Image: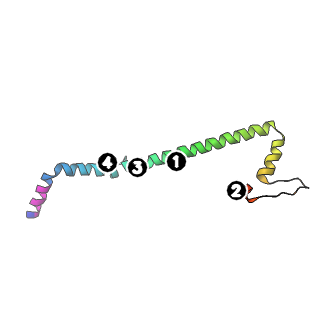
Amino acid sequence: MDKLATLWSFVRKYKYMITIVLFVVIVGFLDENSIVRRMGYANEISRLNSEIEKYRKDYEENTERLKELAVDSGAIERIAREKYLMKKPNEDIYVFEEDLEK
């Protein structure tokens, strides 16, 4: 009985501190909209926005290439030679390692 009385006096003495700590634990870690989850969502949004920008840039580059192909007939041959390493029957191709890295 003495332990129960000691526990009760501790709770009565620190009731506001216990309430605040419980609130912080529930809101910060256990809640569906916790601070930890919000930080994770913010990181994911940032990553997805950078990915969107990357795809937008790729789209613009590809659109420019498509316009170039529609206008210039020699562009198809140049792209086939550079990107796919195609050649004419009597040609030799020399590929450098630094060209392959690009």
Q: CA distance from mark 1 to mark 3?
A: 15 Å
**Marks 2,3: beta carbons within 8 A:** no
**Marks 4,2: beta carbons within 8 A:** no
Q: CA distance from mark 2 to mark 3?
A: 39 Å
Q: Magenta stretch: residue 6 in it?
A: yes
- Residue 27: numbered disc: 4
| Place of residue 68 in the rendered image (x, y in percent of width and height, measured from the top left) | 77, 38
Circle 3 residue: 37
Report the amino acid beneath label 4: Val
Eyeballing the image, is 81 above or below 59?
A: below
Q: Earlier in the sequence, mark 2 or mark 1?
A: 1
Eyeballing the image, is 83 above or below 3?
A: above
Report the amino acid beneath label 3: Arg
Residue occupying image coordinates x 20% and y 50%: 17
Eyeballing the image, is 31 above or below 63?
A: below
Q: CA distance from mark 2 to mark 1?
A: 26 Å
Q: CA distance from mark 4 to mark 2?
A: 50 Å
- Residue 11: numbered disc: none
What colouring method underlies this structural image? rainbow
Q: Is residue 11 left or right of residue 53?
A: left
The residue nearer to you, when weighing 96 against 54, is 96
From the viewer's perspective, is the residue at label 2 or at label 3 nearer? 2
Count of all numbered marks drawn on residues in the image = 4
Other-residue count near label 3 (Cα within 10 Å), few / some / many at <14 / 14–19 / ≥20: some
Eyeballing the image, is 70 above or below 80?
A: above
- Residue 47: numbered disc: 1
Circle 2 residue: 101
